[in-house]
Amino acid sequence: MAYPPHFDETLNLVKETRRFRKSQEIKRLNDAERTELIENYHPDYRAEGMEPLRIGPNRGDRVPIELAKALESYSIYDPGRLNLSEPDYSTDILIVGGGGAGCAAALTAREGGAEVLMATKLRLGDANTLMAEGGMCSPVRPEDSPYMHFIDTIGGGHYTNVPELVKALVLDGPEIASWLIGMGVMFDYEADGSLKVNHCGGHSRKRMLSCKDLTGLELMRVLRDEMRDREIPCLEFSPVVDLLLDEQGSCAGAVLYNMDTADFTVVKAKAVIMASGGIGRLHIQGFPTTNHYGATADGLVVAYRSGAEMIHMDSIQYHPTGTVWPEQLLGQLITEVMRGHGAHLVNASGKRFINELECRDTCASACIRECSERGNGVVTPTGFEGIWLDTPLIPDIKNHFVGIYQRFKKYDIDIQEEPILVYPTQHYQNGGLRINPQAETSMPGLFAAGEVAGGIQGKNRLAGNSLLDIFVYGRRAARRALELNGKVASPVRLTVEHLHNWHDRLNALGVPKAQQSPVLLPDYTPK
Amino acid sequence: MANLIPIYYLGKKHMVPEGVTIMGAIENSGHRLVRGCGCRGGFCGACATVFRIPGDHQIKVGLACQTRVEAGMDVAILPYYPAQKVLYDFKTVTDPARALQTMYPEMYRCLGCSACNKICPQDLPVMDIIAEAQRGNLPAVAELSFDCVMCGLCASRCLAQMVPYNIAMAARRLYSHSMLLGPDYVGVRIREIEQGVYDRQIDALLEKSQEELQKLYAERDIECI
């Protein structure tokens, strides 16, 4: 499965122009040029990809069509048939989602003495956290400071971030690093005992802590092990399908769906921490994704229809360099560190078209422009289109990027000799449930942490900031829930009135009954 | 259109496009996976798969999301594998090598058969990892086992019935917890934050207009690579 023969012509052009391109300077865009490029080509600005929500707290807000459909949907079961008077489980704190944010919340809540139950869609640890390669940013070095991390994050987010959330993010960063070190995470170190730090896009200081190129895997392995050591119960293959409220309208539990038995489980809780992750597997605007199989926005959907407010849900992050060929690797991430090491973005005729070190939304927009309006893309036999990431420019690539080298070698592509065909791929949900610095959503009793929460990263997230935010807000959610737990009694009566109301409103809008959510898993069987 | 080749999944024959992954082939033949599918990128170990090829007596393995189909292959994805894990409070450890030996004494029953090496889809030297664990060489276990995705296949084949991936997990944590302590400057920074050193600086930023922030951002000095 090397490149198809009809790629020969463009591959030759890339090879022939390599020498010239090495000495070519491409100027960075100024603010106005950058804004124009993004507004014309970034998928977030495609009018046909968005639609205004018709009901709920964010009525009138534009969101991706795929999300709008999931939000404006009926429950996948009849809420009237639940036995709410005899819950299957009763606990202090229910945590939805078994990724980095969920585990941070669960461990912190247990440390504080609460009774904790976790529910997750797949296995404990099956989450985007585990797939993070690069690392986690934290302003720990003497040369760095939380002040600089704040400026970088808010500038990278185009000043749309909720500043108080960024403040909490950067001030908690060092404590999070220390917490993880204390749990036995195998971070990379220099010979002198200092933490190894990497530079990454948009950060003005080296502050990315790493565990080789498998940072997320190492973090998730340790958290999962600690979850088991603390004997925190976790219901696997049990995604959330709705939230339950008490008579005052506070969140008081959830309905889970047991994927093994097709039964519904009622959980009563004094607080619910939503840590259900992102949206990639809804394939916004048809984009492939770097996300985990379970990233279908379930938490966002169930929280919204129970009354929790969202923020920035018109903002999706597309990573400029997702794999296009071989198709088996479609959408998989090619780290931006490769561009940092000198790889060019090159069109079918062998020409560069953007400074490769612009941030993610800018580079992604430029790649899309090249393939659409300018017609300079390379078309694969099955109709996908991409541009080249010219990897042979990277010195010693085989050692620097051993994982990527081997991944392509399996398909007879030697990235030392040949470039990689790439196109933007959905990577991250910038927006999410609106939270305050205590991780409280707009609904009493409901907290949110991790990718499902919004506002922290603004409309463009910097590399390394999400691995930090999941832990910061996971722990903050748990601490706040612990604080309030002592003050509230266990809910007396659970209700699903809000779901009946929601269904009535959908009915009035003429939404067909077959339109149900959450989606739970994508469907890749032939249509 | 790609050529179609036969594979057998759960005993049923399916014609699937040549060149696709085992996971792609299973989905292409109409199955919506629930168990046996995770990150789809080779990180998570959810799709550990065993298979045989006609005419070959050997049992073969791979991650379904990373392994391409071969004509006639008979595949099963492991939905779950029960594993022994010893609960432990890592904070109480004084002698990490000794602790590992106490937690998993069965590691000394290794027969040296190397079935674990042969089955590891990550090509890890599992038997060497266990040998280093027996010697109490935790740094070596940690390095050699770092790419482990904990898929469970080694445990499924071990003649001594141990769970190599949980032994390696414990070894990595014991090693990191006792020997990678983090530099002093982390604690210094945490104390500065507790003392409120940065609150005033950042609160001043919260008062600034977007134009002022833009100026600060544009003029910030960037550390050399």
Image: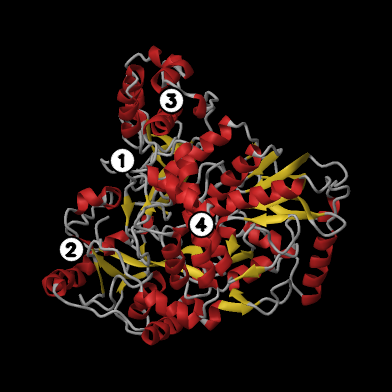
| In this rendering, the label closer to the viewer, 4 or 2 | 4
Of the numbered discs in the image, which one, if any, rests on residue A193? 1
The answer to which quarter of the image holds residue B22 is: top left
* Residue at figure coordinates x 74%, y 74% from the top left: A55
Chain ID of residue with mark 4: A
Residue B72 point in image, percent of width and height: 38, 40
Amino acid type at mark 4: Leu
Q: Is residue A300 visible?
A: yes
Amino acid type at mark 3: Ile
For the residues beneath circles 1 and 3, the answer to whether they share a chain is: no
Chain ID of residue with mark 1: A
Chain ID of residue with mark 2: A
Q: CA distance from mark 3 to mark 2?
A: 41 Å
Q: Tell me if residue A420 comes above or below residue A356 in the rendering.
A: above
Crowding at dot 4, Cα within 10 Å, few <14 / some 14-19 / many 20+, comes out as many
Q: CA distance from mark 4 to mark 3?
A: 36 Å
Which quadrant is the N terminus of chain B positioned in?
Answer: bottom left
| In this rendering, the label closer to the viewer, 1 or 3 | 1
Disc nearer the start of the sequence (4/1): 4
What is the secondary structure assignment of the residue under circle 2?
helix
* In-image side of A510 versus B91 (left or right): right
Of the numbered discs in the image, which one, if any, rests on residue A393? 2
Amino acid type at mark 2: Leu
Q: CA distance from mark 1 to mark 2?
A: 33 Å
Of the numbered discs in the image, which one, if any, rests on residue B167? 3
